[in-house]
Amino acid sequence: MSARKTAIVTGSATGVGAATALLLAQRGHDVVVNYSKSEAEARQCEQACRAAGADVLLARADVADDAGCRKMVADAVARWGRLDVLVNNAGITTFSGSANWDALDAAAFQRIFAVNALGSFQMIRAAAPHLKAARGAIVNVSSIAGALGIGSSVPYIASKGALNALTLHLARVLAPEVRVNAVCPGMITTRWFVDGVGKQGYDSLKAYYESATPLARACSAEDVAEAIAWLACGASTVTGELLLLDSGTHLGTFGRAVVPPKP
C-alpha cells in the first residue's frame, strides 16, 4: 500500500479539474487524471502533477459509463492499494439560455444528466468501499445553478440540483467513515465559458457578474481548487455542506450598481 494519500479527480484535463489535481499533487497525493476527450491537455496535467512529486495514473473514461467508472477506481486501488479522495468534477452543459428553456430535446437533457448527476453517483458507488476503509472524503463540484436555479440551461440547472441532493443524502449514508461535501461556484474564469458563449459574450458576462456581486470578482479555477482541497483534506468536522463560491451572488444585488450586459 502506498504511504502517500491518493485521489481521483474526474474531468481533470483542464480548468477546475486540472487545478485540483495539481494542488492535491502538491499537497502529497498521488492522483488519477481523468479525461474523456482532451488527451493532450490531460497529459500536460499529468506532467505537472509528476513535477510536483506525484505518481499519476492517466485514465480515459466517460463517467456516464458505469463500467468506465468501476475500472477507474479499480485501477487506482490496484496501483496504490488505497483511495482517500474522490473529486467529482466532470460536467457538461449546453448554453441554451433562459429564453430558450424549452428548446432542448430529451436526448440533450439525458446526456447532461448522465454526466453531471449519474456520473457522480456511479463514481461514488464504485469508490465508497475504498473511501470507507481510508476514512476519506468526497467533494462534488456542483454550481450555484443547482442552488439558485440560474445557469446555462435547464438540464444543467436540474442536474446540479440533483447533485446537491445526492451530496446531502450520501453525507448521511456514508457517515461516519466518509465526509461528503460539494462546492457550488458561480462564474469561473476558464475556457469553459469562453467556448460556450464566445469571447465577446464571455467578456460581457464577466463584466456584468463583477458589477452585480458583492465581492466584484469571478472565481478562478485555482480559487475553486483551494476550496475543494480544504473540504477533501481538512474540514474534519464538515459534511453535507454545499459551499457557495459565488462572490455573494446568493445575496442578490441590493446595494450595488448593476450594469446589464449589452445585447
Image: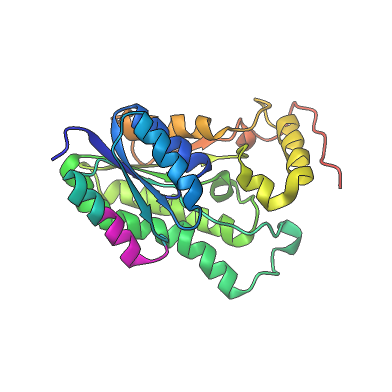
Q: Quadrant of residue 54?
A: top left
Q: Is residue 115 above or below residue 44?
A: below
One can see residue 36 in this view: yes
One can see residue 12 in this view: no
User: Does 159 sit left or right of 60 as displayed?
Assistant: right
Instruction: State the residue lying farthest toward the right.
Output: 263
Q: Residue at x 34, y 35 (%)?
A: 232
Q: Quadrant of residue 256?
A: top right
The percent coordinates of residue 104 (x first, y second) are 66, 69
Q: Residue at x 51, y 44 (%)?
A: 14
Q: Quadrant of residue 235?
A: top left
Q: Residue at x 64, y 51 (%)?
A: 151
The percent coordinates of residue 190 (x first, y second) are 61, 40
Which quadrant holds the N terminus?
A: top left
Q: Is residue 184 above or below residue 10?
A: above
Asked whether 108 falls inside the magenta stretch, the response is no
The percent coordinates of residue 22 (x first, y second) are 41, 34
Q: Main secondary structure of the magenta part?
A: helix
User: Does 40 sit left or right of 82 as displayed?
Assistant: right
Please, which colouring scheme is shown?
A: rainbow
95 or 209: nearer the viewer: 95
User: Does 262 sit left or right of 250 as displayed?
Assistant: right
57 or 156: nearer the viewer: 57
The percent coordinates of residue 207 (x first, y second) are 76, 34
Instruction: State the residue lying farthest toward the left.
Output: 1
Q: Residue at x 51, y 31 (%)?
A: 222
Q: Which residues are magenta?
A: 64-73
